[in-house]
Amino acid sequence: MADSDNNPNGPAISKRIKISKTQQETLLIVLIAAVVLGICGVLAVYFGKYIGFNSKVIEAKDSAIADYEKTIQNIGLCKDSDRDGKFSDEEIRKCNPDTLDSNSMPGSLRYNVMVNMANNTDLESVARDSQKDCYDSAGDKIDWQEKFDDTENDEEKARYLSMLKMCSALRVVPDALPAQANEEALMSSLNQIFNISAWDPEALSPSGNVVSSTEGLSTIPVSLSVESKSDVTTTVLNNIERSIRTFDLQTATVSWSGNDSLSLQSQGVAYYTEDADVVETTKTVYATNDAKKKTSQTSSSGSK
């Protein structure tokens, strides 16, 4: 007390000390606040980029799901119970295309093939009628479409679907453009043409190896030799032209001889389709355009 009373600067020094401590505390608080603010800023930027990137991933997934759902709906693989174009996981798990009622999916590829095309009378007029299983004991054609729609048994549905493909106008499709390189069936088709043309060939055999012509379509070489009266040879050519299966005669040599004989030597091809595969694409989602460019540059450098 004595020193304070005797020293006039004592109270001032005490105040300065207190102010200095307050400034230090304030400075420390500001520093801490700045550090916290900086961390929050970094975290905000990080989480902003994280949310933005995940939004791109979710958008890409939603787009892929929408494409799958559109494909399923357009083809008619699964029944859309709610008719909203969406398919739940449960609907996908329970989906069995072989047991679906085609009439319940109008507008789909399945409906157009199994209903419209299968019942097309113009196509039916050229379909084969030689399948005994397509008719009942009275000789009447069995309505396999009706049987398919009426039954609830999965095995029966699969069988009726198979019979529907074989006995309806759908039979025209594999007849016109087979799904495999079956040379025996090709020779059988030619032999049928020769039979209805009243001409008996001396020999009938494939002429070479299968050749791929365009994507999804391949050819089987065909060698044709006809030597008979002009009207018979002409009939053979006309029936080949009218055949539901295309025979593309690429080269031909025609010669006349005595007794109204017309000789034809030709080379051509018959067509069939190759197996169709489902092509799945992979989409890579990048956080930024710079990341995409760097990845592309790295890939280019690695390929070199």
Image (cartoon, grey):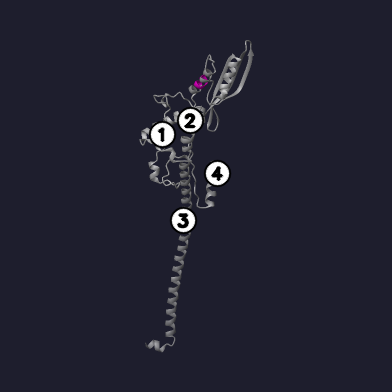
Q: Which mark is residue 146?
A: 1
Residue 181 within the segment the image draws in magenta: no
The mark that comes first in sequence, 4 or 3, is: 3
Relative placement, left or right, of 139 versus 242 is left
Give the mark toward the camera: 4 or 3: 3
Q: Which residue is mark 3?
A: 51
Against 151, residue 40 (above or below) is: below
Mark 2 → mark 1, Cα distance in angstroms = 15 Å
- Other-residue count near label 3 (Cα within 10 Å), few / some / many at <14 / 14–19 / ≥20: few
Counting from the top left corner in percent of width and height, residue 51 is at 46, 56
Q: Which residue is mark 2?
A: 169
Mark 3 → mark 2, Cα distance in angstroms = 55 Å
Give the mark toward the camera: 3 or 2: 2
Q: Which residue is mark 4?
A: 300
Identified at 44% across, 77% down, the residue is: 20
Going by the numbered disc 3, the residue's amino acid type is Ile
Give the mark toward the camera: 2 or 1: 1
